[in-house]
Amino acid sequence: MKFLDIIRSAIQNSFRNKLRTGLTVVAIFIGAFTLTITSGIGTGVTAYINGQVSAIGAADVLTITKAADATATASDGPAAYDPSKSTTVSLGNGSRPGSTIQALTTADLAKIKATAGILSVDPAVRVSPDYVEYAGNGKFELTVSQTGTITTADLAAGAQLDNSSSSDQLLLPTTYLDNLGYANAQAAVGTTVSIAITDYTGTQQTVTATVVGVQNETLLGSGAGLNRSLVAHLHTVATTGEPAGVSAGYATAVAHFDASATKAEITAIKDDLSAQGYSSQTVADTIGAFETVINVIIGVLNAFAVIALIAAGFGIVNTLLMSVQERTREIGLMKAMGMNGGRVYALFSMEAVFIGFLGSALGVVAAIGVGSLISNLLANGIFSALPGLQVVQFAPASIAIIVGVVMLIAFLAGTLPARAAARQNPIDALRYE
């Protein structure tokens, strides 16, 4: 019997007992369906995060904070007062709400700038405008993106912020357009808005700025992006009337290094900063934490799917063992006619592989259909504020690997019954009742 004849016979034999084979295929279908969906979720979410990182750019930026004082412990009690140190309330730097962190002083900024590999450093100045208004269409709260000056926005219209410009510029989120009275994103580009902010004495002042672009909402913070000129302008207004003795302190600083720096060079810079008492991280470090959590969740879901496939493998063993028992005399006849044990083994193994292929193919096709439908519904529904997010995506390579893994499990499951069939003695098999 030639190899093609073995394949043809294996397929035909698989359907001798349609109910039994069908139930085994359903078990494999469930495992393959689950594995494909979880793989698709991992691919979709990872692709979106990678897209966000690519859009953000800022590969040459380090966000720096003062490291916690590791020498102090709870049993030591409060540390001695050091007038050279200052603290500031954390307002969204990843710390617990209400906690305080040590502020960066002007001297700290000088030390950071002197670090080997650091090209420039700027304090992260936080401004809190009261409202934004366009053409008398009403006053609305303005949330400012803290990463606006260091990132490349995902634009819906217009251009990126020019941080080297002396003009005041901002990027409006798409969610602001309707309230401010813009017909669409393009209509907002080039217009002038008024931004109000309260100074140190409690007096509200307004600053005008030009909308240079409209940005889509992203994972890494929402809110309007302001260029350095506008941030400095608003900060100057906010500190109007501030007593001369108030010392400047910054929660974070942004340092730039050579964009062509290697991973080892970036690590060396971070180690050097750490030795000086500063914590630093790149955008990739921040994204890496997201990816780690997502990969763990996807891994757990995949583990459940693999367990389902292993259970389906026992179904294949049971199906083929019963088939071997039912076809004992047929096996004896095939061997009496000259078919050797290797070809009998191949025939039953091929039946197992075909059942695995059938179940995995149906599971993958169903998962692609259901996953694509759900992904589109979510993209147009609760995730409509995150353009480009397709929660479930399917990579051809991943699909091929899933089908291959399921067929391998089926082959391994079919080994025992195939071996039993191959070892049948033709005389005893022909006498079998």
Image (tube, rainbow, N blue to C red):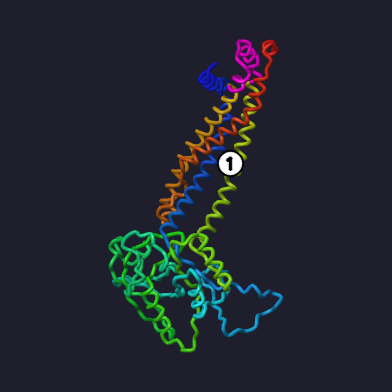
- In this rendering, does residue 98 appear at all? no
Based on the picture, tell me whether residue 181 belongs to the magenta stretch.
Answer: no
Q: Is residue 68 left or right of residue 226?
A: right
* Residue depicted at 43% across the width and 59% down the height: 218
- Asked if residue 338 is among those painted magenta in the image, a careful observer would answer yes
SS assignment at label 1:
helix
Q: Is residue 104 visible?
A: yes
Across the whole image, how many numbered discs are drawn on residues?
1
Report the quarter where the N terminus lies: top right
Q: Position of residue 310 (x, y in %)?
A: 62, 36
Give amino acid for label 1.
Ala
- What range of the chain is rendered magenta? 324-346
Q: Position of residue 28 (x, y in %)?
A: 57, 34
Depicted 285 relative to depicted 92: above or below: above
Residue shown at the point (49%, 68%) measured from the top left:
63
How packed mark 1 is, by other alpha carbons closer than 10 Å (few <14, some 14-19, many 20 or more), is many
21, 19: nearer the viewer: 21
Image check: 171 left or right of 326?
A: left
Q: Position of residue 414 (x, y in %)?
A: 62, 28
Q: Position of residue 80 (x, y in %)?
A: 65, 83
Q: Specify the quadrant of the image occupied by residue 316.
A: top right
Question: Which corner quadrant holds the C terminus?
Answer: top right
Dominant secondary structure of the residues highlighted in magenta in the image: helix
Q: Residue at x 46, y 54 (%)?
A: 50
Q: Which residue, given by chain and number where applicable, does mark 1 sit on?
A: 305
Q: Residue furthest bottom?
A: 244
The image quadrant of residue 25 is top right
Q: Answer with the quarter of the image where residue 83 lies.
A: bottom right
